[in-house]
Image (cartoon, rainbow, N blue to C red):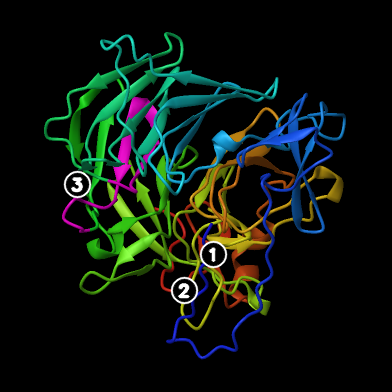
Amino acid sequence: MLILLYSDTNYALEGFVAEYFTSVCPLKCIDLPSCTGETKCDCEEDVISISTNNETVTKCSTQHSSKDHPSAVQYYNDTSIGRVDHSALLLHHFVYVFGGYDLNSILNDDLLVLNLKKGTLKSIRQDSTNTSRIWPTSRRAHASATYKNGFFIHGGKTAEGIGNELYYFDSDKVQWIQFPSDGLPRLAHHTMARAAHGYIYVHGGGTPSGQFSSHLYRFHGEDPSSWELVRSSCCGKEKGRRLLGHTMNYWPKENALIIFSGLVADVGKFAKLSPVVWIYWIETFSWIPIEYWRLSGGFYQNIERAFHSAEIIGSHLVVVGGYTHVHNRDESCYASQVLIYNLKCHSLVPLPEIPAEKGLDVEGVFGQKTVFWSERNELLITGGYRGYLKTRIDTIPITFTVNSTECGSYKKRWECSGDAVCGWCPNGSFSFRLLFNYANQTKD
């Protein structure tokens, strides 16, 4: 084992004190009969992970759920979950995890299936004896989206470089389908989202030449090989949409795509974290760039990020983790904040207090994937990196309620006129918070 500590001479800092210990068991196996090798705690029963005093330990237990923990995966722990740059998609009460990177190699040997109601994890493996059965090549940084009773994956990094293959996994038939990919773009670290009327949208990503893409493509789920480049009527600079490591979510209430932060191409081959939320109005083929509204009091000092995850819940975009380092402004590597972005007000709202008995232990992480389980109002976090690969599936209970008092508390125009940051929309006769550079809050 090699432990390497180094310092960046560009920083005028005072140094640090490092304390470490070694163990043949991962994450401190305690109260266990034995430990098998360096990757697994040997339990006669199930393994769960418990956090105490900001320290994660692994214990043997048969208790996955209780009255206070209705989710069977509140502390689910398995070393096979440890990965980054993977895909995780929710179908009914099953989470499908595919591909990714374990810091040593690109993963592909199985498709993990987590049953949220039973708290069980199984793997669907490639049948090496059946060469006619289609199985995707090993890949990471691919894009994915659900469609009907399955999901699509596209592109990503493979052993041969950045690919353009398009696959669909049919969960009913438990098999992969590969579609012709001639003419499809080669992309990695891009995004994919399912919108209305069966259309799948693909945006951004890195290309084999090292450039960042700003293109927005779409295809229909019933004709996956026929992609079209989506043209826009306006607005904002195209170079601001050259992104990778960002998120793109479909907002059904407004029939719009929401793109949050990511790495944007700067000058030359350099990149920086994007401080912009992009909204693409599907009906009008128009882009609207919106700068973040920073809360007063300095609570959110740095909210630009990349390789994060995001889910739309009601009219809120819930953003988890991400790479956040900004030189001389934020010296942390990965975010521990959970951001709630109000899509109607275009402002950040504080995360409500969550009772300690809910078991929430938010740690800084990036490269993870999240899914929202609406049946239990829980956000599930799979994989990710925070100095080590996270092998635990954490859940965040969504306890906040949707309200618009922050940006829409004024009911009459004359009341709004007395507030310097209040804007009035005559079409709907409602108030909203003014933005940094834009007076319009909606597409109207």
Residue 236 placed where, x, y %?
28, 64
Name which of mark 1 and mark 3 comes first in the sequence. Answer: 1
Residue at 12% x, 35% y is 183
Tag 3: residue type?
Arg
Residue 305 lies in the magenta-colored region:
no
Label 1 sits on a secondary structure element that is loop
Residue 432 placed where, x, y %?
56, 62
Residue 210 lies in the magenta-colored region:
yes
Q: Is residue 411 visible?
A: no
Q: Would you name the residue on which mark 2 appears?
A: 436
Label 3 sits on a secondary structure element that is loop
Tag 1: residue type?
Ile
Depicted 186 relative to depicted 11: above or below: above
Q: Would you name the residue on which mark 3 appears?
A: 231
| Cα distance in 3D space between marks 1 and 3 | 50 Å
| Cα distance in 3D space between marks 1 and 2 | 46 Å
Residue extending furthest left?
183
Residue 262 placed where, x, y %?
40, 59
Residue at 63% x, 60% y is 336
Depicted 392 relative to depicted 237: above or below: above
Q: Is residue 358 visible?
A: yes
Residue at 45% x, 25% y is 110
- Asked if the residue under mark 2 is in contact with the one under mark 3, i.e. CB atoms within 8 Å, the reply is no
Whether residue 43 sits left or right of residue 233 in the image: it is right
